[in-house]
Amino acid sequence: MDAIIKSACGENIKNSSFKNYKSISIKLFNIINKNKYNENMKDEEIMIGFGKVVNKFHTLKNYLDDGINCFKTTTKKNYINNLLNVILKINNINNYCIKKKNALNQIKTDIKEYWCNLRQDLDTINIEKKKIKEQNELEKNNNSEEEEEEQLEEEKQLKQLEEEKEEKEDNLEISIKKWIINKEIKYLEQKIKSLYQDINNL
């Protein structure tokens, strides 16, 4: 399997990329072929299996699109990208595909069209996600503004209450001072009156 995959993507491919291509290629192989891939398979068996993946593209497409199998659009796009850029580029893969050239070309065209449709669907999904994200951010900002306004209003009310309290305290203090002054005046008046009486009695 390794040599077959490397014939499509080159010997200098990064190890992480190679593992990913190989993994997806095996998954595609197993979707279409009754005899699932195993490490003991001969190269000829693997090539025949990959040829079936190409020939039965429409079966593969229906399998990926079936909601029961729960494939995300991103996953489907990655699988078809692997079919286009790995399996279809394996050395001598055409020898294991359908013999009629026109029929094979039509299959390749259908694969490319399906890939393009998946890419458009993915773009649409990303645009919708972006709109939702922007809407959420806008609502968040609006909520923040409302919360800020409420906080300012609350602070304003608290300040007003404090001012009213201070004013009441000042008024109370003034009232107390007036009461004390009046009390002192009355006392002095009584004292003066008493002195006059004492003088008159002399």
Image (spheres, helix red, strand yellow):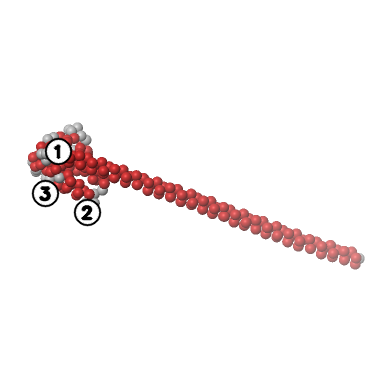
Left or right of residue 128: residue 198: right
Instruction: Estimate the x, y position of residue 14 in percent, counting from the top left.
Output: 21, 35
The tag on residue 34 is 3
Q: What residue sits 11% from the left and 39% below the top?
A: 100
Using a 10 Å C-alpha cutoff, classify the residue at mark 3 as few (fewer than 14 neighbours), some (14 to 19) or many (20 or more): few
The tag on residue 102 is 1
Q: For the residues marked 2 and 3, what is the alpha-carbon distance in whole angstroms?
A: 20 Å
Q: Pick whichever of labels 1 and 3 is earlier in the sequence.
A: 3
Using a 10 Å C-alpha cutoff, classify the residue at mark 2 as few (fewer than 14 neighbours), some (14 to 19) or many (20 or more): few
Instruction: Estimate the x, y position of residue 34 in percent, counting from the top left.
Output: 11, 49
Q: Nearer the viewer, residue 62 or 93?
A: 62
Residue that protrudes farthest toward the front in the picture: 102
Q: Is residue 95 above or below residue 183?
A: above
Element marked by disc 2 = helix
Q: Pick whichever of labels 2 and 3 is earlier in the sequence.
A: 3
Q: What residue sits 90% from the left and 65% below the top?
A: 200
Camera sees residue 154: yes
Is disc 1 in contact with disc 3, using a CB cutoff of under 8 Å?
A: no
Quarter of the N terminus within the rendering: top left
* Residue type marked 2: Ile
Q: What residue sits 20% from the left and 39% below the top?
A: 109
The tag on residue 68 is 2
Left or right of residue 61: residue 153: right
Camera sees residue 26: no
Which mark lies nearer to you, 1 or 3? 1
Element marked by disc 1 = helix
